[in-house]
Amino acid sequence: MAPLAKLYVEFLRAEALEVVQCTRGGEALDAAAASSPDAVILDLKLPDMDGLEVLRALHARDPAVSVVIITAHGSIDLAVEAMRLGAFDFIVKPFNADRLNLTLRNALERRTLARMVEGYRKDLDRGRFHGFIGSSPDMQAVYRTIESVAASRANVFITGESGTGKEVAAQAIHRASPRRDGAFIALNCAAIPKDLLESEIFGHVRGAFTGATGDRPGAALQADGGTLFLDEICEMPFDLQSKLLRFVQTGTVNPVGSGREERVDVRFVAATNRDPLAEVQAGRFREDLYYRLHVIPLALPPLRDRGGDVIEIARSFLVDYAREEGKALTAFSPEVEARLRAHDWPGNVRQLQNVVRHVVVLNDGPQVTLDMLPPMGGPETGAIPRAGGVLPVADTLEEDGAVRPLWQVERDMIRKALRLSGDDVPRAALMLEISPSTIYRKLQQWRAAERGGAGEEAA
Ligand SMILES: Nc1ncnc2c1ncn2[C@@H]1O[C@H](COP(=O)(O)OP(=O)(O)OP(=O)(O)O)[C@@H](O)[C@H]1O
Ligand SMILES: [Mg+2]
């Protein structure tokens, strides 16, 4: 045994290979664990272990390892069995150096190819990418686009229905880019009052307007060296669009009230859930700005077009939320998965998120069953009764003198927060400074009250 092994090492001396010689099976497995060999030459007759056992263990550790079997003339059956178990090739003793070298070269080549294929495969069906979950072909295309644009400075224009992950995409572009150590500044053009937007973007100097008590850098300056994410770009007032265009073209900003120009280095990523060209045609969005920002288009597919992603994403949310809420829920029943898969998800991933959160907050047990699902019909999210639905939404809270029952005020305020946050329960909870669970519980109580026809005060 040992002298033969020595001979084989001699055979391989001329090759530029690093060879480790072992005389026992256990020793070989330890060596494989320590140095991850590309190929193994394995004599099936070992002093301590069954050679096939060693083969199995080698493959279990690394399925791509190429194992060449050495066998005696009388034990071809064993060699055939080894091939069936995935050995790459076998050589019958005695053999010369050429035979061993040739077989080993082939084995190593196969190993290289296997590695390449593995690399492509990983690339092709990535299930996770910078905050995204989902391995559907459409999302693979999204990941590839993000990866290939990230390295450049080209501006990216993201479109997609509400809740499809436009903000996730913007962050992924930043994180995959060489600017990742710079700041990612997100500016929501819809959420900021129109008259404040200019100073939010460009900053202002002290005294620029009533209330400007000091110099304040805007988002542009904060994003210097990083990425400026202009969210809901179509909501930007028309007159401000020309100022933004100047910034995009020249890379300089002019803080409100200052005569100074400041040069900044930012990469622009814009997003909208509208059809930007329709906005251009309707005269609401400047065409020149559109073309400046729309260098690389990135369209996020609606969740209903992503096939099995729905389940992949739902399972991941279930695990996360169950951990957060201290619940034992670990899986969906097959009926629930079928229902989730069949739904058309008008609110996309955000809606799915709300549904799973709702289920986890209000239920427990190892499995999510159909009865735990909230109604999912609504156009925003099934988890949330539509504002203005059964109960009137009071925007009259500020009305002086009218004292109303506290439960009404609470309900109206929660609905208002949901409306302002686009039915994003965690975001609404932040605004209200309460926990998301509280909102989910309230929603369920109201629905139960509506169903039972009981008084509104069921909460
Ligand atoms: N593929 C995904 N995998 C996991 N989570 C996702 C995915 N896409 C979106 N999300 C999550 O769903 C929520 C909504 O995503 P995001 O805010 O990026 O959507 P959006 O397109 O910007 O929506 P809106 O148009 O309403 O602003 C976020 O909590 C985000 O983390
Ligand atoms: Mg968004």
Image: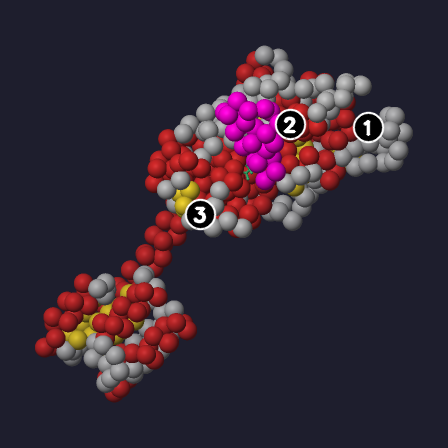
Residue, x 25% and y 87% (percent of image)? 3
Query: Residue 411, located in which quarter of the rendered image?
Result: top right
The amino acid at mark 2 is: Arg
| Residue 255 quadrant | top right
| Front: mark 1 or 2 | 2
Element at label 2: helix
Residue 435, given in percent of the width and then of the height, sits at 63, 40
**N-terminal-most mark, 3 or 1:** 1
- Label 1's element? loop
- Tell me how far mark 1 sits from mark 2, CA to CA: 40 Å
**Does the magenta run of residues contain 450?**
yes
Front in this rendered view, residue 101 or 39: 39
Residue extending farthest left: 74
Residue at 58% across, 45% down: 175
Q: What residue is disc 2 on?
A: 411
Mark earlier in primary sequence (1, 2)? 1
Q: Neighbour class for label 1 at 10 Å: few (<14), some, many (≥20)? A: many
